[in-house]
Image (spheres, grey):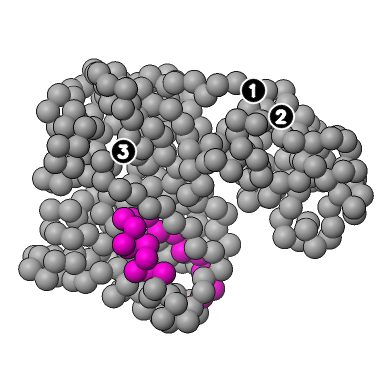
């Protein structure tokens, strides 16, 4: 049974199952999601959405509802679209206008806490609810700080480990940060946390051309989940990750990257430290390592996750080089 990811304009993602021969619009309605539509038979174009990935067939429709040019650009009519495989679709509407159910809280138990360095820690949550959870690698959830009404957004750093219903996170330890303080000083295995999601439009699309992944500090987290998916599904295109940090202590999960490089065909990575006094031998910012060999004359997709100055620096670098990638997806984050 194909699983459909519906991404809404406000960053909310909902997953639905489509039965054999069922249109995406009907599957959504059965799941209490009303994709905007009027005719239900390919005549009006109201249910037009943007296809991102997956294979499908289209029932008959009229050109006034969907032109040939729109179809070539990936537009689909969900009232005519029948998924053959798992698909990702962008819905040009806010989730609150379409979703008839409230996103439920997910409760999970802390099963692992690892202080990877003075500046970074990872933790793992597990529960039966997580085992049933679906998200796209690169997305995030809002995690509630236990004992408070405050939440913090963190990207998944793994796919769901189905054998134990677990997911992992990689976060920066922020001095006096509300979540950091709880995780460092109070959290212990067996504690319960509440999360809600998934959210976000930063996620791995179908790989159709070379990929360049740019990670700043704990912006590495979503790429670890993406690399898990590439390892699981295979990747025919070259993928290069540039992982930039400030100091030696910020450089973590190198063993995982080495393992991915050994197991994923065409994957390579470079790590670098910006502090000239760092012991790590490769110095500089990520832009110092974006040479012609990884830029493919602009015929590539770039994914970037890091602090706002890093996003601005990469944009400026690409403009100065006169290179415009086919797609540039990025996620800015701030410490909290």
- The answer to whether residue 259 is seen in the rendering is no
Dot label at residue 323: none
Check contact, mark 2 vs mark 1: CB within 8 A: yes
Inter-mark Cα distance, 2 to 1: 7 Å
Decide if residue 149 is on the left or right side of residue 2.
left
The vertical placement of 300 against 191, above or below, is: below
> Disc 1 on helix, strand or loop?
loop
Q: Which residue is mark 2?
A: 34
- Dot 2 or dot 3: first in sequence order is 2
Q: Mark 1, residues whose alpha carbon is within 10 Å: few (<14), some, or many (≥20)?
A: few
Tell me where residue 67 appears, x and y as whole percent.
84, 57
Dot label at residue 100: 1
- Asked if the magenta segment contains residue 306, the reply would be yes
Check contact, mark 2 vs mark 3: CB within 8 A: no
> Disc 2 on helix, strand or loop?
loop
The vertical placement of 163 against 117, above or below, is: above
Q: Tell me the quarter of the image containing the N terminus.
A: top right
Observer-nearest residue: 265 or 70?
Answer: 70
Observer-nearest residue: 248 or 93?
Answer: 93
Q: Which residue is mark 3?
A: 169
Inter-mark Cα distance, 1 to 3: 30 Å
Tell me where residue 87 appears, x and y as whole percent.
64, 43
Tell me where residue 64 appears, x and y as whole percent.
90, 52
Disc nearest the viewer among 2 and 3: 2
Q: Residue at x 64, y 22 (%)?
A: 100
- The answer to whether residue 179 is seen in the rendering is yes
Inter-mark Cα distance, 2 to 3: 32 Å
Residue 30 appears in which quarter of the rendering? top right
Q: Mark 3, residues whose alpha carbon is within 10 Å: few (<14), some, or many (≥20)?
A: many
Q: Tell me the quarter of the image containing the C terminus.
A: top left
- Dot 2 or dot 1: first in sequence order is 2
The span shown in magenta is 298-315
């Amino acid at each position: 049974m194909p699983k459909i990811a519906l991404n809404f304009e406000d960053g909310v993602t909902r997953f639905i199952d489509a039965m054999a021969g069922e249109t995406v619009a009907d599957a959504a309605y059965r799941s209490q999601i009303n994709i905007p539509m009027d005719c239900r038979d390919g005549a009006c174009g109201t249910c037009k959405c943007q296809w991102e990935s997956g294979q499908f067939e289209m029932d008959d429709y009229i050109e006034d509802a969907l032109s040939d040019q729109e179809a070539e650009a990936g537009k689909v009519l969900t009232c005519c679209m029948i998924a053959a495989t798992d698909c990702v679709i962008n819905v040009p509407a806010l989730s609150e206008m379409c979703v008839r159910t409230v996103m439920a809280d997910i409760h999970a138990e802390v099963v692992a806490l690892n202080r990877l360095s003075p500046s970074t820690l990872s933790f793992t949550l597990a529960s039966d609810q997580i085992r049933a959870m679906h998200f796209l690698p690169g997305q995030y959830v809002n995690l509630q700080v236990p004992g408070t009404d405050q939440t913090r957004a963190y990207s998944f750093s793994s796919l769901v480990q189905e054998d134990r219903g677990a997911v992992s996170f990689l976060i920066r330890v922020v001095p006096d940060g509300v979540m950091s303080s709880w995780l460092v000083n109070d959290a212990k295995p067996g504690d319960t946390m509440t999360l809600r999601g998934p959210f976000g439009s930063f996620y791995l699309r179908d790989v159709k051309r070379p990929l360049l992944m740019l990670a700043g500090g704990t912006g590495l987290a979503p790429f670890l989940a993406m690399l898990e998916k590439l390892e699981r599904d295979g990747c025919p295109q070259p993928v290069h990750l540039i992982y930039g940090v400030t100091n030696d202590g910020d450089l973590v999960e190198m063993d995982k990257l080495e393992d991915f490089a050994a197991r994923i065909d065409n994957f390579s990575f470079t790590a670098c430290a910006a502090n000239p006094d760092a012991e790590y031998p490769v110095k500089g910012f990520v832009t110092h390592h974006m040479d012609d060999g990884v830029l493919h004359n602009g015929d590539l997709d770039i994914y970037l996750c890091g602090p706002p100055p890093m996003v601005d620096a990469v944009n400026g670098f690409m403009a100065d080089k006169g290179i415009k990638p086919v797609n540039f997806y990025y996620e800015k984050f701030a410490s909290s």
